[in-house]
Amino acid sequence: MNRCTFLRIGIYSLLMFSLAYFYVEYCGNESLRMQFLNWMQESFFKRFDNQDIWRDGYPDHWAPKNDDKYISQLVVRELKENVSPDEESLFARFANNEDERKFECLSCMGWFENWSRYSKALVQRAKRKGLPFRELMECLSVISPSPKSDIALVPVCAYFGTCNGEKAWIIICKWESMGFSPNANLIHVRIWVVGTGSKKVLGYSTCS
């Protein structure tokens, strides 16, 4: 093969790859997109080891949504201070912090399955930490959404503390309206304070 022929094949391959990428990224469905990414991973991505650029074999902006890696980052913690049920106080204390913001890349897709999976993972983590995990399970059931809800909701943090003298679980969820986009990220926050004895919602706050 002479140099001219090799160059023509290289240019043709680059052109075909660019067209395939454009179609899959902007015109294809989710299944086709993932098949293309898997092929790219096998063909190209495994040649790179720079973790500042690649994550789990994929470029950061192509990383599969709802990756299970988020389960390992779920937050369960005991609070020593009393928690105020006031809406503004709850939002100031538990929203827009490092604990909940690291889950903003979760998407609406498969949200109800993730509700179940993440709830179980939070309960398991509470059990390992010696916190009242059965009560957490019951508190999660108090705020559990309907699978037909038009709001995608996933629990990501659970704090055990006291609210107005009653032991309570403070549960932080990420949410987004399904009407906005079925693939939108869960960038909003909802906060519930649920009493472990009364099983009643003692406080609630959310962003608009």
Image: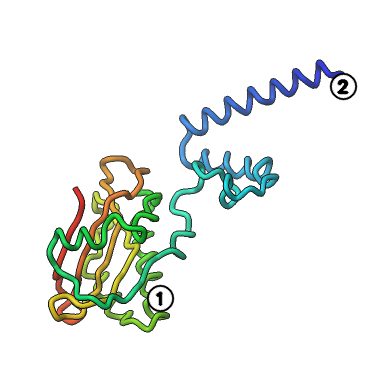
The residue drawn where x is 24% and y is 60% is: 145
Foreground residue among 156 and 114 = 156
User: Residue 102, how many percent across, how many down?
Assistant: 39, 55
Label 2 residue SS: loop
Q: Is residue 127 above or below residue 148?
A: below
Foreground residue among 145 and 148 = 145
| Pointer 2 or 1: first along the chain | 2
The residue wearing badge 1 is 124
User: Residue 53, how many percent across, how many down?
Assistant: 58, 44
The residue drawn where x is 31% and y is 82% is: 132
Quarter of the image that includes the N terminus: top right
Q: Amino acid at mark 1?
A: Gln
Q: Is residue 78 above or below residue 187?
A: below
Residue at the limit of the structure toward the front, as seen here: 81
The residue drawn where x is 48% and y is 59% is: 68
User: Residue 100, how many percent across, how many down?
Assistant: 34, 58
Left or right, 163 with respect to 116, comes to left
Q: Local crowd at mark 2 within 10 Å, few (<14), some, or many (≥20)?
A: few
Quarter location, residue 121: bottom left
Q: Amino acid at mark 2?
A: Met
Left or right, 2 with respect to 35, comes to right
Label 1 residue SS: helix
Quarter location, residue 156: bottom left
The residue drawn where x is 56% and y is 50% is: 55
Residue at the limit of the structure toward the top, as seen here: 4
User: Residue 103, how many percent across, how many down?
Assistant: 38, 55
How are the colours assigned in the image?
rainbow
The residue wearing badge 2 is 1
